[in-house]
Image (spheres, grey):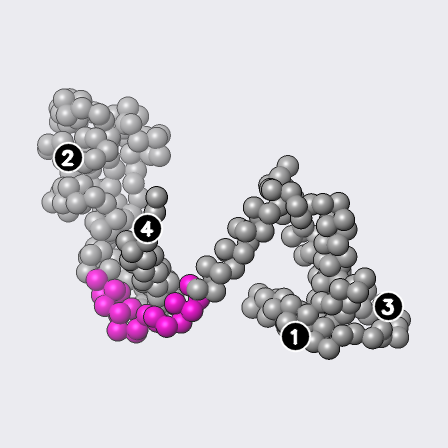
């Protein structure tokens, strides 16, 4: 129930923002009460700062909402409702409850962390050169071919050798794959679909690339997952997407690496007891 309350409040606020523009259209103009300087409204004598409305406005704009008088009216109405409910909650003593105070602190920390990381990202941008270098490295690692393969995964080397012996006697790979320990494809004849070698662990990729089309591995292949018997069904040229198409994803990936490195550096300098 405690986890439900923040979500309930968020849903209430979202609902108010969606409904308020309609109410703003339907409501008749009313005489504006005296408002304190730097505030958009007062609720039972408590001023709602203009800065708070501006922060909520910027949040809505960032989500794609167009700026309009209706949106601003909705935000004002939302903040009034928040203040009204907040005052009601304080009268009930909810602001003094430990679990509510813990949520306050988590929210405060989250806002601070977000502001800090946004500033860090702005001052440590990922260069176009870094993106290009990463793209080239990915292309090189993936290679220029992709392979359609099957495999059978077992726990012991002797089991894999037995499967190879049965294949050499003419048994069907698809049938033997039913005893595979890989639940994702055992019922599909061990079919792994199309993939570049870079998508597999090295020993698996090396064995796959060495196979001839239509052949299966003559010896078991060891990986961290167990022992494999491979079969290569087909090979085709791999078409890499152009840099411009994947640039945003690469930028995000590199930026995340920069952030993680910074966090590790801070952690190394931090005294934790």
Q: Which residue is mark 2?
A: 221
Q: Which residue is mark 1?
A: 67
Location of the C terminus (image quadrant): top left
In the structure shown, which secondary structural element does the residue marked by tag 2 occupy? strand
| Distance between mark 2 and mark 3 Cα atoms | 74 Å
Q: Is residue 159 left or right of residue 110?
A: left
The span shown in magenta is 117-137
Q: Which residue is mark 4?
A: 271
Task: Classify 10 Å Cα crowding around label 2: few (below 14), some (14-19), many (20 and above).
Answer: many
Q: Which residue is mark 3?
A: 27
- The structure residue drawn at horizontal position 88% and vertical position 75%, both measured from the top left corner, is 31
Choose the circle earlier in sequence order: 4 or 3. 3
- Residue 128 in the image: state x and y as whole percent: 30, 74
Task: Classify 10 Å Cα crowding around label 3: few (below 14), some (14-19), many (20 and above).
Answer: few
- Residue 235 in the image: state x and y as whole percent: 21, 50
| Distance between mark 4 and mark 1 Cα atoms | 46 Å
| Residue contact between numbered discs 1 and 3, judged by CB atoms under 8 Å | no
**Residue 16 occupies quadrant:** bottom right
- Residue 163 in the image: state x and y as whole percent: 18, 24
- The structure residue drawn at horizontal position 22% and vertical position 65%, both measured from the top left corner, is 136
């Amino acid at each position: 129930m405690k986890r439900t309350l923040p979500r309930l409040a968020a849903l209430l606020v979202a609902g108010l923002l969606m409904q308020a523009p309609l109410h703003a259209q339907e409501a008749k103009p009313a005489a504006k009460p005296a408002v304190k300087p730097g505030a958009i409204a007062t609720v039972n004598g408590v001023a709602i700062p203009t800065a708070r409305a501006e922060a909520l406005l910027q949040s809505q704009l960032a989500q794609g909402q167009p700026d309009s008088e209706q949106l601003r009216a909705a935000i004002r109405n939302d903040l009034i409702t928040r203040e009204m409910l907040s005052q009601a909650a304080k009268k009930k003593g909810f602001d003094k409850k430990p679990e509510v105070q813990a949520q306050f602190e988590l929210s405060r920390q989250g806002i601070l962390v977000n502001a800090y990381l946004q500033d860090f990202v702005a001052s440590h941008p990922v260069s176009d050169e870094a993106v290009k270098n990463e793209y080239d490295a990915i292309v090189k690692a993936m290679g220029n071919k992709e392979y359609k393969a099957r495999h059978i995964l077992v726990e012991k080397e002797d089991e894999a050798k037995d499967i190879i012996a049965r294949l050499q006697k003419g048994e069907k790979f698809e049938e033997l794959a039913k005893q595979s320990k890989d639940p994702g494809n055992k019922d599909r004849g061990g079919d792994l679909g199309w993939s570049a070698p870079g998508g597999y662990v090295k020993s698996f990729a090396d064995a796959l690339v060495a196979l001839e089309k239509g052949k299966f591995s003559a010896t078991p292949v060891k990986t961290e997952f167990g022992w494999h018997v491979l079969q290569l069904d087909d090979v085709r040229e791999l078409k890499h997407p152009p840099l411009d198409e994947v640039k945003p994803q690469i930028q995000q990936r590199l930026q995340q690496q920069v952030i993680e490195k910074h966090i590790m550096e801070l952690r190394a300098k931090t005294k934790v007891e």
